[in-house]
Image (cartoon, coloured by chain):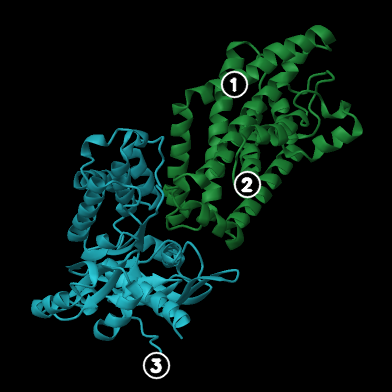
C-alpha cells in the first residue's frame, strides 16, 4: 500500500529518494519518516550518500527519482518554501571571513528577509547561547575553528528554521570544541524545539540521537533508536586474540553467531547477560587463546556488524566451499 | 520579499569596497596614470587638435575605465564567492537563484559607479571638467556604463568555474574591451577590422555616451562617434540580454550541480 497521505506531524518524509550521477547511484531509494522535534542521525562512511541526501532534502540538488516533503512542502515542487523552513550547516564554512561576526549574521538574516530589529535581537540571543557574545565585532578570520563552526550554526538558525540540517558539524575540530558544538546543538533543541537532521561518521557522537539510520552505498541498512540497535546486538562484545583465528571463528560461530576478524582480533557478540556463562566460555578457551576481552557494545559495533559480518561471510564461503 | 536579500548583497559589496583601501586607491590611480602620463605623452607628440587636447579627449575614456575595472572586478569576485563560503549562504536562502545574478550585477554596478564618482571628483579638482558638462547625460552615462560592465562581468562569471588567475581575465577580457572601445581613439579613425570590433563592443557605447556628456559636440576630430539614442538603446539591450542569459545559465541544473559539489567538497584532512 502506498502512503500518499501527508502526515503533518512529520518534519521530513522521503519516499524512494534516489540520486544517480551517470551510472553511479549515490542514493538508492531512500525512505525516511522523521517526526517534528526528533534528533535524527544519518550515519555511514565517507561516500555512502549522506551529503547527497542532505542536498536533495534541502533542494540544492534535484532527485533523479522519488520525492520528499520537508517542512511541509515538496522538495521538487516548492523548493523556496522548503528552503524558508530549513537551516543548513554545510561541511565547509558558509561565512565571509572578511566580515565581522555580527555582519555575517546580519547578511544571513537579510537573505532570509528578516528586519534589522529581528536580526539584532536574534543575533545577541544566539551569540549568548553559543558563548560568542564578546566576539560580535571581531572579524571571522580572528575566530578559532570551534568558534567559527558555532557561528556557522548560529548563521544557519537565525531565521528560526523548523529543521536544521547539520552535515558533519564536528569534522576537523578537536575534542573540547566538539563537545562545545554538541552542547550548543542541545541548547538549540531545548530552546526552539528544532528538528535536527545530522550526518556524521563519528558514530559515538550519534549516541544521543533519538533515531539513527546507517547507510551504505546509498541504502539504509539499519534504522532505529541507538539503544535498541545496541541492545539488539547482544549483551557484550568479546574480542579474542589467538594463534589460529580461522579455527577459532569456525568453532565459535555456531555458538555465538557470526563474528568477524578485526585486525588480529576475532570479534563476537555475546547474547546473554549472564556473567557465569561468560566465565564458562573463558575457562573453556583459557588454553587456546592469547587474550580475551569483554565489553559493552556501542554504535560502532552496530555498524561493524552490519558491514563486517557480511564481508566475513562472503570471504568464508569463498575460501571454504 | 526579495528587497532585503538584494540589499544584503549590495551592502556587503559596498562594505568590502570601502574596507579594501588598496582596491579603492588603485581605482583612483589607474585612470589618473592614463590621463596624466599617456595623455600628456600623446599631447606632446600630436600637438593640439582644434580646440581640444588629446588629454581632454581621454577624460570620458578614463572615467569609463574606472567603471570597467570596478564593475568587472566586483562581478568576477562572484567566482571567488563560488569557492568560498558566501555562495553557500546565497544558494540555501529562500529565493530563486537568478536573484543572486541580479543582486550581484546591481552591487557590481554600484561599486563601479562609486569609483566613477570618486574619479569624477578628482577630474573636477584637476580642472578637466570645465568644458561644460551635460549633467543628465553624465548621470545616464555613469549608470548605463556601470551596468554594462557589471552585466558583462556577470556573464563571464556565470561560465567560469574557477578563477585561478586574475591576470588571465585582465589580459583576455578587460584590456581588449578597453582598448577596442573608442576610449583611446575615435572609432571612426580605426582600421576597418578594429572599427568593426569596436562597433560590436557594448562598452564603446558607454564611453560614447560619456563623450557626449563631458566633451559635448565640439568642433574637433575628437567628437563622439554615435548619437545619444543609439548609445542608450545598445546599452539597454545589452544589459537586458546579458542579465537574462547569465540568470538562465545560473539556474540550470547542469551548471548548478557542479557548483553545489564545489561548495560541498570534502575538507582535505
Residue in the picture at 60% in, 60% down? B252
* Residue sitting at the far right: B192
Viewer can see residue B155: yes
Left or right: B57 as drawn, with respect to A276: right
* Helix, strand or loop status at disc 1: helix
| Residue B185: x %, y % from top left | 80, 23
* Helix, strand or loop status at disc 3: loop
Q: Which residue is mark 3?
A: A1
Residue in the picture at 28% in, 45% down? A117
Tell which chain the image draws in cyan.
Answer: A
Left or right: A83 as drawn, with respect to B166: left
Q: Which residue is mark 2?
A: B160
Going from N to C along the chain, the mark reached first, 1 or 2, is 1
Q: Colour of chain B?
A: green
Label 3 crowding class (10 Å Cα cut-off): few <14, some 14-19, many 20+?
Answer: few
| Closer to the camera in the image, B264 or B141 | B264
Residue in the picture at 18% in, 72% down? A286
- What whole-number distance in Å separates the C-alpha atoms at marks 3 and 1? 72 Å
Q: Quadrant of the N terminus of chain A?
A: bottom left
| Residue B238: x %, y % from top left | 70, 45
Which label sits in the foreground, 1 or 2? 2
- What whole-number distance in Å separates the C-alpha atoms at marks 3 and 2? 48 Å
| Residue A126: x %, y % from top left | 24, 48
Residue in the picture at 35% in, 52% down? A171
Q: Which residue is mark 1?
A: B120
| Closer to the camera in the image, A111 or A70 | A70
Chain name for mark 2: B
- What whole-number distance in Å separates the C-alpha atoms at marks 1 and 2? 32 Å
Name which quarter of the figure residue B46 lies in.
top right
Amino acid at each position: 500500500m502506498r502512503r500518499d497521505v501527508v502526515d503533518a506531524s512529520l518534519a521530513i518524509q522521503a519516499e524512494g529518494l534516489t540520486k544517480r550521477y551517470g551510472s553511479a547511484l549515490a542514493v538508492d531509494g531512500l525512505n525516511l519518516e522523521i517526526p517534528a522535534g526528533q534528533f535524527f542521525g544519518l550515519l555511514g562512511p565517507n561516500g555512502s550518500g549522506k551529503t547527497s541526501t542532505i542536498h536533495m532534502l534541502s533542494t540544492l540538488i534535484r532527485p533523479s527519482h522519488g520525492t520528499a516533503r520537508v517542512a511541509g512542502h515538496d522538495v521538487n515542487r516548492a523548493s523556496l518554501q522548503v528552503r524558508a523552513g530549513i537551516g543548513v550547516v554545510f561541511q565547509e564554512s558558509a561565512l565571509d571571513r572578511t566580515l565581522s561576526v555580527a555582519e555575517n549574521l546580519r547578511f544571513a538574516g537579510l537573505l532570509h528577509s528578516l528586519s534589522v530589529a529581528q536580526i539584532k535581537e536574534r543575533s545577541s540571543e544566539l551569540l549568548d547561547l553559543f558563548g560568542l557574545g564578546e566576539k560580535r565585532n571581531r572579524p571571522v578570520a580572528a575566530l578559532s575553528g570551534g568558534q567559527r563552526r558555532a557561528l556557522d550554526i548560529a548563521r544557519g538558525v537565525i531565521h528560526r528554521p523548523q529543521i536544521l540540517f547539520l552535515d558533519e558539524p564536528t569534522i576537523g575540530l578537536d575534542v573540547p570544541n566538539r563537545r562545545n558544538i554538541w552542547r550548543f546543538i542541545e541548547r538549540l533543541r531545548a530552546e526552539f524545539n528544532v528538528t535536527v537532521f545530522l550526518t556524521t561518521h563519528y558514530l559515538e557522537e550519534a549516541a544521543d540521537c533519538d533515531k539513527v539510520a546507517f547507510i551504505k552505498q546509498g541504502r539504509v541498512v539499519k534504522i532505529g533508536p541507538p539503544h535498541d540497535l545496541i541492545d539488539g546486538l547482544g549483551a557484550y562484545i568479546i574480542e579474542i586474540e589467538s594463534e589460529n583465528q580461522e579455527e577459532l571463528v569456525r568453532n565459535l560461530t555456531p555458538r555465538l553467531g557470526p563474528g568477524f576478524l578485526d585486525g588480529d582480533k576475532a570479534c563476537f557478540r555475546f547474547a546473554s547477560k549472564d556473567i557465569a556463562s561468560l566465565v564458562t566460555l573463558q575457562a573453556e578457551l583459557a588454553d587456546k587463546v592469547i587474550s580475551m576481552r569483554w565489553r559493552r557494545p556501542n554504535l560502532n559495533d552496530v555498524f561493524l556488524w552490519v558491514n563486517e559480518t557480511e564481508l566475513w561471510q562472503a570471504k568464508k564461503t569463498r575460501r571454504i566451499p | 520579499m526579495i528587497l532585503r536579500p538584494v540589499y544584503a548583497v549590495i551592502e556587503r559589496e559596498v562594505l568590502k569596497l570601502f574596507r579594501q583601501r588598496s582596491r579603492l586607491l588603485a581605482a583612483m590611480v589607474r585612470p589618473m596614470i592614463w590621463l596624466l602620463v599617456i595623455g600628456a605623452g600623446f599631447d606632446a607628440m600630436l600637438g593640439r587638435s582644434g580646440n581640444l587636447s588629446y588629454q581632454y579627449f581621454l577624460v570620458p575614456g578614463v572615467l569609463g575605465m574606472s567603471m570597467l575595472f570596478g564593475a568587472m572586478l566586483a562581478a568576477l569576485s562572484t567566482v571567488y564567492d563560488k569557492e568560498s563560503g558566501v555562495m553557500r549562504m546565497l544558494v540555501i536562502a529562500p529565493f530563486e537563484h537568478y536573484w543572486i545574478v541580479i543582486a550581484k550585477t546591481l552591487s557590481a554596478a554600484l561599486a563601479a559607479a562609486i569609483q566613477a564618482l570618486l574619479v569624477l571628483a578628482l577630474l573636477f579638482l584637476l580642472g578637466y571638467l570645465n568644458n561644460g558638462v551635460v549633467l543628465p547625460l553624465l548621470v545616464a552615462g555613469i549608470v548605463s556604463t556601470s551596468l554594462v560592465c557589471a552585466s558583462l562581468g556577470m556573464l563571464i562569471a556565470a561560465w567560469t568555474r574557477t578563477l585561478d588567475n586574475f591576470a588571465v581575465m585582465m589580459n583576455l577580457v578587460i584590456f581588449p574591451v578597453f582598448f577596442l572601445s573608442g576610449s583611446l581613439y575615435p572609432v571612426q579613425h580605426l582600421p576597418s577590422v578594429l572599427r568593426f570590433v569596436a562597433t560590436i563592443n557594448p562598452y564603446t557605447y558607454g564611453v560614447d555616451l560619456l563623450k557626449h556628456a563631458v566633451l559635448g559636440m565640439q568642433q574637433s576630430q575628437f567628437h563622439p562617434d554615435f548619437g545619444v539614442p543609439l548609445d542608450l538603446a545598445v546599452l539597454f539591450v545589452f544589459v537586458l540580454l546579458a542579465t537574462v542569459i547569465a540568470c538562465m545559465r545560473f539556474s540550470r541544473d547542469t551548471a548548478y550541480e557542479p557548483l553545489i559539489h564545489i561548495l560541498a567538497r570534502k575538507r582535505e584532512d
